[in-house]
Image (cartoon, grey):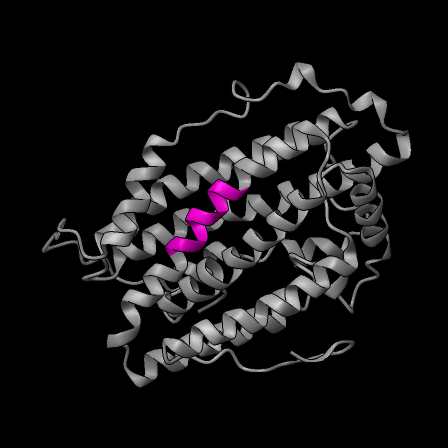
Amino acid sequence: MNGLTAIPVERRFPLDLATAIPALERLYETAKLDLWSPADDVDWAGARLDAYSAEQREAARRVWSRRAWLEYTGIEETPALLLRFCLERDREVDAKFFLTVKNTEEAELVEAYYRYAEALGGYAERPADPAWEQVINRGRASQALAAETSLDGCVAANCALEDGLELELCRAHLSRAREPLARALLERAIVVKTRHADFGWSYLEARAPALAAAQRAAIEAALAAWLKEVAFAGYQVATLATAIDSSPEQAAQDLCAAAGLGAATASEEVALFCAYLGSARERLQRLGLALPVAAHPRLGQL
């Protein structure tokens, strides 16, 4: 189609506003009440980051800037995902409501990460190695809007599997964080990421019993694509990349972790990723879905 994205035809009526998935309604109501402002609710003036060496601050600046880049992709994808839910007939209203607040929470995290990188010496506008830009700029909005893309597959891969991994990474980063501001931001991120992961898994659990064989196959294809094309490319865990030299990212992570500025080491992230895949695979199996095993060039079958 000459490079254009095929978008489904809108079918707005009949409009059903009845609760379909109570777990999602609870997440939406909780998020509405959990108001937070990175500008007003964080003691930026009280930060004592000048106590750290220039090398430590530079490493942390790189780590936190990268987090802002990754979070920004959610700001792009979530509105597209919401639109897709609205375009498809009979999709649950609870998911639509929650996605409106999810987008706000993603924007708050971007601002928080940006401000912390600025406090450390200046937010980096883009990766030092341009090769990372293709990994990070994934075109998720176009993917979510494409008519041939499985909406359930998008939710399974990007909201359940991916947001669940990001939650576990946040927990690992917090476990090593000693600097008060980094701890405060990561504690907030964990609250938000818990909701986001719960949304993905709860939606998948609600949908799973009624899925036809073709729908299950589409979800499994999306999960397999995420594993090979996103995770193995080094999107969340830079060390997994094999097409790009991730040693500068690994060095920055390790130094940031040692300084207590809110990171896990590169090797800890890889171990966490492998463990998370195992637990996620078991959870998917209970829903009658399979996360296909894939061969990583260095780590072997995962």
Residue 78: percent from left, percent from top: 43, 49
Q: Which residues are magenta?
A: 190-199
Instruction: State left or right for residue 217 relative to residue 179.
Output: left
Residue 99: percent from left, percent from top: 36, 47
Residue nearest the viewer, comparing 149 with 22: 22
Q: Is residue 127 above or below residue 201?
A: above
Q: What residue appears at the point 47 percent right and 78 percent down from the top-left corner?
A: 221
Q: What residue appears at the point 18 percent right and 62 percent down from the top-left corner?
A: 90
Q: Is residue 34 above or below residue 250?
A: above
Q: Quadrant of the N terminus?
A: bottom left
The picture quadrant where one finds residue 45 is: top right
How many badges with numbers are in the image? 0
Q: What residue appears at the point 38 percent right and 70 percent down from the top-left corner?
A: 150
The picture quadrant where one finds residue 185 is: top right
Q: Quadrant of the C terminus?
A: bottom right
Considering every residue shown, the one lying at the far left of the view is: 14
Instruction: State left or right for residue 92 relative to residue 166.
Output: left
